[in-house]
Image (cartoon, grey):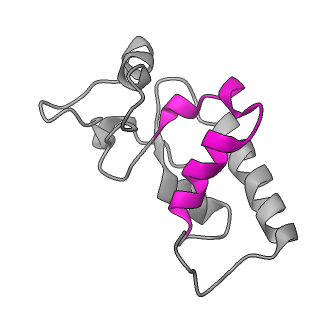
Amino acid sequence: MKDYPDKMTKEQARRFGDDVLNIVSQIPRGKVTTYGHIAALAGWPSHARMVGRTLRYTPGAAELPCHRVVNKEGRTAPGWGQHRALLEAEGILFKPNGHVDMSRFLWEP
């Protein structure tokens, strides 16, 4: 794991995780946001990868619309074959390069 200059305490990490789950729960159907955007909204803009870990390893996170989170270029998660299909089922369109059309579908609260 990367050694961040702004390391979190255990309490900050717990709060960060709660904030991430809360933010993801608010992403509306037919929209996406990025790991980095969620990290920034949670107050830790350099922790985009930690957002991904939180979504992957937190019990109950699978009940949230985690499929609405993509990377900053609009790429889906590697190794998650259903990711694109879940987004397309909500009407999200992909560009010819396989990335979400972020100019149309990016959610910024």
Residue 37's x, y, as percent? 51, 57
Q: In the visual, does 98 lie left or right of 88?
A: left
User: Which residue appears at 20% of the width and 32% of the height?
Assistant: 98
- Which residue reaches farthest bottom? 5
Determine whether, in the image, residue 66 is placed left or right of residue 85: right
Dominant SS in magenta = helix
Q: Is residue 109 visible?
A: no
For the N terminus, the quadrant is bottom right
Does the magenta segment cover residue 66? yes
The answer to whether one can see residue 10 in this image is yes
Left of 20 or right of it: where is 92? left
As displayed, is residue 70 above or below residue 93? below
At x 63%, y 42%, the residue is 55
Q: Position of residue 39 (x, y in %)?
A: 59, 61
The residue lying furthest to the top in this view is: 89
Question: What residue lies at 68% left-to-right and 61% top-to-bottom?
Answer: 42
60 versus 57 height, above or below: above
Magenta stretch: give its range.
47-69
Residue 79 picture quarter: top left
What residue occupies the far front of the structure in this picture?
A: 1
